[in-house]
Amino acid sequence: MDPVEQFKNQVRESTHFVRERIEVKPLIGIVLGSGLGGLVDEIKDKKVIPYRDIPHFPIPMAPGHSGNLVSGKLEGKEVIVMQGRPHYYEGYTMKGITLPIRVFKELGVEILILSNAAGGLNPDFDVRDFMIITDHINLMGTNPLIGLNDPELGPRFLDMSQTYDRKLIEIAQKVAREEGIRLHKGVYVGVPGPSYETPAEIKFLAKIGANAVGMSTVPEAIVANHAGLRVLGISCITDVVSDKKKVTHEEVLVQAEKAEVNLRKLIKGIVRALR
């Protein structure tokens, strides 16, 4: 079978499975990153589907990623939420880790909120601050759009000049001000991982204009734009990257969980403000 048609069939099968088991028609999709999955506790009338039950869905194996697809109502809006995400470093293909975004599109999602835990490269950032992603740098060494392109999925050559929706950014800033949440704006750089950055890499990333670094989000943002979704990206700064300090995933999760209460407030406020 043609690889493009095979992939489309996988998306259709995943979508059909999910659609048969949820009771909402979500316009808003949310991806919750490392240690940030507690937002699902706020969802009303929720339905939970483990990723392992969904045909072709990649299963996250990293700690801090529960691996559940949760649907229901948040602030009165119908949503679908990924509680945890798969990563490229786990051995999945780029098309594999972004298949859920294609499923979101088929389910009717129009707005995608991406969250992640990230290392802060900007000296003005503190641990548990948040950063709205205004742009990104793809240093993951590949792109989820490589391969044959089907115009039904999106354009062959994708414009990325406005990857992150400006109106959504304005809404996020307004909510942060109202809630008293420290929110910066900046550039996120995506790296493949799973190793953390060397001192030389930290200096390099800062010099090329990155304000935060992580191992996710970029592939999802690319595919979401390819599919015509409006995208908002939020990084939770779980450590301030330094060439003199060791980073552990355990500490990342600790800080993400401490910041998670503010992420709930931020996302709930954003969802509430959406028309």
Image: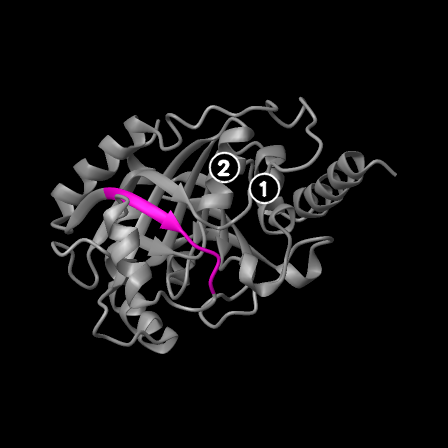
- Against 182, residue 163 (above or below) is above
Residue plotted at (28% across, 45% down):
208
Q: CA distance from mark 1 to mark 2?
A: 7 Å
Where residue 113 sits in the image (x, y, percent)? 40, 42
Three-letter code, disc 1: Pro
Q: Residue furthest right?
A: 1
SS for tag 1? Answer: loop
The answer to whether one can see residue 26 in this image is: no
Seen from the viewer's position, the closer of residues 198 and 170 is 198
Residue 261 left/right relative to 110? left
Residue, disc 2: 222
187 falls in the magenta region: yes
Seen from the viewer's position, the closer of residues 54 and 128 is 128
SS for tag 2? Answer: helix
Where residue 107 sits in the image (x, y, percent)? 61, 36
Q: Quadrant of residue 162?
A: top left
87 falls in the magenta region: no
Residue, disc 1: 144
Residue plotted at (54% across, 29% down):
226
N-terminal label among 1 and 2: 1
Query: Mark 1 and 2 residues: CB-CB less than 8 Å, in contact?
Result: yes
Three-letter code, disc 2: Ile
